[in-house]
Amino acid sequence: MQHTRDQLENNQVAIYFGAVALAALAALALPGTTALEAAVNPALALMLFVTFLQVPLAELGRAFTNTRFLAALLATNFVVIPLLVAGLLPFVPADPLVRLGVLLVLLAPCIDYVVTFSHLGRADARLLLAATPVLLVAQMLVLPVYLRILLGDGAAGLVQPGPFIDAFTWLIAVPLLLAVAVQSWAGRSQAGARVSTVLGLLPVPATALVLFIVVASVLPQLGQALDAALGVVPVYIAFALLAPIAGWLVARLFRLEAPAGRAVAFSGATRNSLVVLPLALAVPGAVPLLPAIIVTQTLVELVAELVYVRAIARLGKSTPTVDAA
């Protein structure tokens, strides 16, 4: 089992790109793939459940006791990155829906495949994994606030509170409680331990499934929003270049050891596009523009991750490390 899991994690980049390519072929060859939109939320709930299952309860406590790392992580994602996004916003087309899509995706830190990419990039992935519930709850709380600040009352009003409440319930609370229940079962019985071990193989396949469903359902509609999607690519590239540097500088400011600093850099650069997609789909008139804007960021980011796993891994090699306490 462990060998299979290691193989999945070590080949996750190829698996994700394979899922995207297969989804593109399916969207071009088969009619009706847009109907897969209905499967986005269930697939996301599965992905987050198996992601949370990888967080031992002791490690979740570690996320709160390692205050320096948590402070750096929160400062990066909810202070520095929003300032960076605000600086990039004037370069985004003035269409309120386009700006809403860009803000939705760039203001939300990733809580799923960032863990495995950071592991490949020699970051402290366990610290990042333990902090995933904190990041997910925090972004659901602050995202409406930042949208209102950056878009104004009118445009921010496009986002209704209902989808945020649904997302918190079904994408955070329920998967997290199920993960806790399975962990408890695994600690009390061999059958539970076997089930937990099998479920531990699923984070990479579940993420690939979400990518497949999202791309297959959105791609047939992309043609109608192609110009808008291409128009935000330079902003996404600029973000991909600047965000990891910002995260690393914050980590240095907080005097984190190098692996923890790399985790902050990965978190700052990797966004939660898959989880915010249901929020975008709930916006009136969102399709096809908002999904296209968000999926475009995913594609740019996956390419950027190939660079990150090599470049970020080199950060801090020549500097002395300081224990994060």
Image (spheres, rainbow, N blue to C red):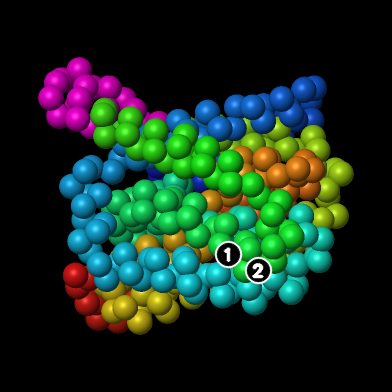
- When the figure is inspected, residue 200 is found, relative to residue 251, above or below; the finding is above
Percent from the top left, x then y, of residue 213? 62, 32
Give the SS element for disc 2. helix
Q: Is residue 202 magenta?
A: yes
Q: Residue at x 27, y 71 (%)?
A: 68
Compared with 105, 218 (above or below) is above
Report if the CB atoms under discs 2 and 1 are less than 8 Å apart.
Answer: yes
Q: Is residue 58 left or right of residue 216?
A: left
Residue 60 among magenta residues: no
Instruction: Identify which residue is drawn at 30% across, 51% down.
Output: 130
> Looking at the rendering, which quadrant does residue 248 occupy?
bottom left
In the picture, measured across the screen, residue 111 lies left or right of residue 35, that is left
Describe residue 154's horizontal placement relative to residue 173 as left or right: right
User: What is the magenta segment's predominant secondary structure?
Assistant: helix
Q: Which of the 4 image quadrants contains residue 26?
A: top right
Which amino acid type corresponds to the residue marked 1 in the rendered image? Tyr
Q: From which residue to which does the magenta span run?
A: 183-203
Q: Which quarter of the rendered picture does the C terminus lie within?
A: bottom left
Determine if residue 21 is in view. no
Q: Residue at x 67, y 40 (%)?
A: 282
Q: Quadrant of the N terminus?
A: top left
- Label 2 amino acid? Leu
Q: Which residue is mark 2?
A: 150
Q: Residue 254 in the image: state x and y as whole percent.
A: 31, 78
Q: Which residue is mark 1?
A: 146
Above or below, 315 relative to 267: below
